[in-house]
Image: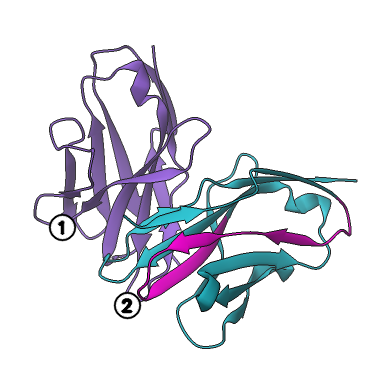
Chain colours: A cyan, B purple
Amino acid sequence: AQSVSQHNHHVILSEAASLELGCNYSYGGTVNLFWYVQYPGQHLQLLLKYFSGDPLVKGIKGFEAEFIKSKFSFNLRKPSVQWSDTAEYFCAVGFTGGGNKLTFGTGTQLKVEL
Amino acid sequence: SAVISQKPSRDICQRGTSLTIQCQVDSQVTMMFWYRQQPGQSLTLIATANQGSEATYESGFVIDKFPISRPNLTFSTLTVSNMSPEDSSIYLCSVVTGQSHEQYFGPGTRLTVT
């Protein structure tokens, strides 16, 4: 079965530090890739997505992610985090023939300290 | 995007009872899904809500436990039947609009079973 793994479960950073959250999936076919963010007390929001084309995608709030097909990875990055980035981040993958169904990673809780 | 509302936002229920969760979207959508997020865990797809026909359930989920209705393109319900404390979770509705693969999530229903 297809699976998605996020290696960092809890990350604590100081403001202005750089962020990289890992996401790997197990599937050899075509995928659609997503990062969602859940701010405290709020619902899931789409941060960015990759369907095809340029493997470096930019999302909202300065986030970007790079799809590396050979590594089955879709890591999320931000050069300089802010306190307001404190949230839980979920990687999600839609697999070919899955009919838009998503498989989620376990999530990464990011805390940004002032 | 789509604006999704869920009712109730939270509930505390006794074991053995059932709860019906409603999901309303502000526009017609292609697909609707129901997910579960158990405490400290990631999102797991329960089923795809099919308009005018029986829902398609994922492995480990059955219609008798989680009956789903989708009478039209903007509304769906999920019932959690014969509840036990293990059903305590956040239940989320999500939608895909048009031909996009982007999936949007509702605010969730936080269910506690005592």
- The residue at the far bottom in this view is A53
Seen from this angle, which residue lies furthest left? B53
Give whichever of A97, B27 is nearer the camera.
Answer: A97
SS class, disc 1: loop
- Seen in the picture, residue A25 relative to B85 is either above or below; the reply is below
Q: What amino acid is found at the position of numbered circle 1 in the picture? A: Gln
In this rendering, the answer to whether A79 lies above or below B11 is below
Left or right of residue B88: residue B50: left
- Residue B43: % across, % down: 43, 45
Residue flagged by tag 2: what amino acid is it? Gln
Residue position marked by numbered label 1 in the rendering: B51
- Please say if A53 is above or below A111: below
The local crowd at label 2, few if under 14, some if 14 to 19, many if 20 or more residues have their Cα within 10 Å, is few
Pick the quarter of the image with the N terminus of chain B: bottom left
Q: Residue at x 37, y 44 (%)?
A: B44
> Quick check: marks 2 and 1 in contact, CB under 8 Å?
no
Question: Is B80 part of what is drawn in magenta?
Answer: no
Say which of A94 and B23 sits in front: A94
> What residue did someone put label 2 on?
B99
Residue B25: image tag = none
The residue under the point 23% across, 13% down is B16
- In the picture, measured across the screen, residue A14 lies left or right of residue B42, that is right
| Magenta span of residues | A14-36
How far separated are the C-alphas under marks 2 and 1?
16 Å
Residue A57 position, x and y percent, is: 61, 78
Mark yes or no: residue B10 visible. yes
